[in-house]
Amino acid sequence: MGGRTILHADANSFYASVECLHHPEIRDKPVAVGGDPELRHGIILAKNERAKAAGVKTGEALWQARRKCPNLVIITPHYPLYLRFSRLMREIFYEYSDLVEPFGLDEAWIDVTGSSGLFGSGGGAAIAEQIRLRVKKELGITVSIGVADNKIFSKLGSDIKKPDAVTEITNENYKQLVWPLPASDLLYVGPATGAKLHRYGINTIGELANTDPVFLNSLLGKMGYVLHAFANGLDNSPVERLGEEAVIKSIGNSTTTPRDLVCEQDVRIIYWSLCESVASRLRKHGFLCKGVQISVRDNQLSSFERQCKLERPSALSYDLCEAAMNLFNKNYNWKYPIRGIGVRGIDLISADSAVQLSLFEDEERRRNREKLDSVVDDLRRRFGYFSVCRAVMLKDKALGGLNPTEHTIHPVGYFKPTQ
Amino acid sequence: MKSPKVYVEVIARFDPEGGLFPLEIIWEDGRRYSVDRITAVRKASSLKAGGAGIRYDCIVNSHPTHIFFEEDRWFVERK
């Protein structure tokens, strides 16, 4: 295999482990971290091994989990604490390499190609072993780590043995370790792609690896080539140097709503509050976005994303919300009520870039919207988030009462736009 | 049952290099204990009390004791 050494570290049941560390009295009980039942963010976000053994699943409603496991201890999430442990974990990674790419709060790739000779003769696996021991000792939680020469196999490796283990995937063993895994374990094989592959008898990563890439291309488009390469460990994407000072590629916000959304007005209320927050953050960081992306999750927990280009780059909550609503109306058929939605500004450019004015748009009106947004920003900064709001928010107290600025945690996509 | 994690008041010393060392612990009931000696300083978690931070291994009243500095608070493990 190639010359790189890449680790993928995955904190086991991250939220639940952090809670168990802080609550010694519940460590030997089934524990789940779940949204606040009061606000009806009632789903399981993480669970410990005992809860898992009882059949509790991430993403299911709290009441479903309680039915399977009556003595389940449910803890509401403490995001600041998880952020702290995520940071402490990254600090350990940074002692072994400056190439650390976090993937959400609880996962990261670490490229130790350049430093694998500095920590004993064991190479990547020895570093992984050191990291595993240090995280356990210093943070009181466990990680499982995969070691390989590419990001895809190292991520699969971190899933093979857990918790608290290191798995090395080599040229010699990848056919035994990786190929029997279900194809759906690969990044970018979701339910739709998985079903398509299954129809042609491709169920494992090995079967995918041994399928003619031209055929996969005819089946899946250019992702066919990508997945074929992934399955053969031929992924050469670099570990991006990302940290807390990461270059911002997109700004987004999403929420699980206080109650299911059942009509367009419900959706509009939430999109307004999310778009206001996204637009205000775009302005704060000095960006305009050239496109808008929405995500929608229904109460069966199936979700999709759609994106579109904007007429012109913008950081106006009005523009974002209009685009989001358009996308939504074009793409949702209301088969099920909606559990959560999100919106993100993509293709960012600097706010001082030259922008083509339009002959057909009322520029005066646009400038007024800009002024309005900045006044709202200022009022909220001085007098709090709820000091001023759009009238539509008052139509529904529960939905309009959502403060999207409270917490924002987003795993980033694997493929990042290059600029 | 009392919590195994006891946040305590601590009198500490900063050295010119920015090092931070506990000198005296003031227990919940107001009793004061002076730190006779610090034998080791390392990052560590406390499974007993439930937390993680910088652990000072100290001799207090001629007993070995761990004192933890967690973000901006000090705690010790209840015996």
Image (cartoon, coloured by chain):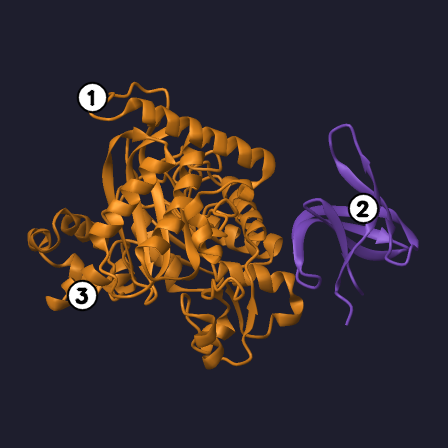
Chain colours: A orange, B purple
Which part of the image, by quadrant, shows the C terminus of chain A? top left
The residue carrying mark 2 is B38
Q: Chain of mark 1?
A: A
Q: Which numbered mark, 3 or 1, is in the foreground of this view?
A: 1
Q: Tell me which amino acid carries mark 1.
A: Leu
The residue carrying mark 1 is A359
Q: Foreground residue, A314 or A181?
A: A314
Residue A3 visible in the displayed image: no
Mark 3 vs 2: CB contact within 8 A: no
Percent coordinates x, y for residue A91 in the rendering: 54, 42
Q: Is residue A338 above or below residue B54?
A: below
Sequence order check, earlier mark of 3 and 1: 3
Q: Tell me which amino acid carries mark 2.
A: Ile
Percent coordinates x, y for residue A76 in the rendering: 56, 62
- Callout 1: few (<14), some (14-19), or many (20+) C-alpha neighbours within 10 Å? few
**Residue located 38% across and 30% down the image:** A369
3D distance between C-alphas at marks 1 and 2: 74 Å
Image position of A367 (left or right of A191): right
Mark 1 vs 2: CB contact within 8 A: no
Q: Foreground residue, B60 or B51?
A: B51
Could you confirm whether marks 3 and 1 are on the same chain?
yes
